[in-house]
Image (spheres, rainbow, N blue to C red):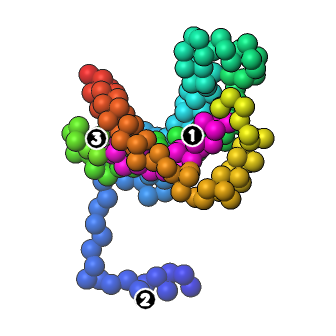
Amino acid sequence: MATEATSKFQNPDLRLIPQPLDFHPERTVKGHDGLYFWQFMVAGSIAGSIEHMAMFPINTAQGGSTAASILKSEGPRGLYCGIGAMGLGAGPTHALYFLGYEICKKNFSGGNYAAHVVSEVFAIVASDTMFTPIDMVKQRLQLANSPYLGVWDCVKRVLREEGLGAFYASYRTTVLMNAPFTTVHFTMYEAAKRG
């Protein structure tokens, strides 16, 4: 019965087009560099989270005399005020960043460095949209004698008292600071990979 139906729908005027030997329609298409795009997201998320969490006390202290005064007045715990905001946001932000970078690089790339620069700018604009509010909350929690009880208290109070715009007050500055730095960073990274 199946052969009868198949023969009815075959058109003798159509020719089969031979497929290349490496054609495997049953396989899921991987992204470039031999990885799936979700793997770029996971790798970026892990790397970004570890980087931000490891460097957090240094970010808080920002210098020897500041570290000494924080340790004297608040103890070691004072170096970690606001780490909850970073813990919640670093992973998703870096996942978005690396996904954006790799997708743009794949779509724009002709193997030239201009593609990496454009990809980097797209990635930083997207990820800073998510990172800027997280960083604002972190900074407010890092303040000496911060009036906030924690991440969610800070988010609720800022939203209620200052509005959504307060979360993005430094967005332009953040992008203008991060884009040139990371553009040079990733252009050198891609050049080193080729080298």
Which residue corresponds to mark 3? Answer: 117
Residue type pointed to by label 2: Lys
Asked whether, in this view, residue 183 is left or right of residue 53, the answer is left
Q: Nearer the viewer, mark 3 or mark 2?
A: 3
Residue type pointed to by label 1: Asp
Which of disc 1 and disc 3 is earlier in sequence?
A: 3
Q: Position of residue 14 (x, y in %)?
A: 28, 79
Do tag 3 and tag 2 residues touch (Cβ < 8 Å)?
Answer: no
Asked whether, in this view, residue 21 is left or right of residue 65, the answer is left
Which residue corresponds to mark 2? Answer: 8
Residue at screen point 61% across, 24% down: 60
Asked whether, in this view, residue 97 is left or right of residue 57, the answer is left
Against 43, is 36 above or below? below
Quadrant housing the C terminus? top left
In the image, which residues are magenta?
119-142
Q: Position of residue 49 (x, y in %)?
A: 60, 33
Residue at screen point 78% across, 41% down: 149
Which residue corresponds to mark 1? Answer: 135
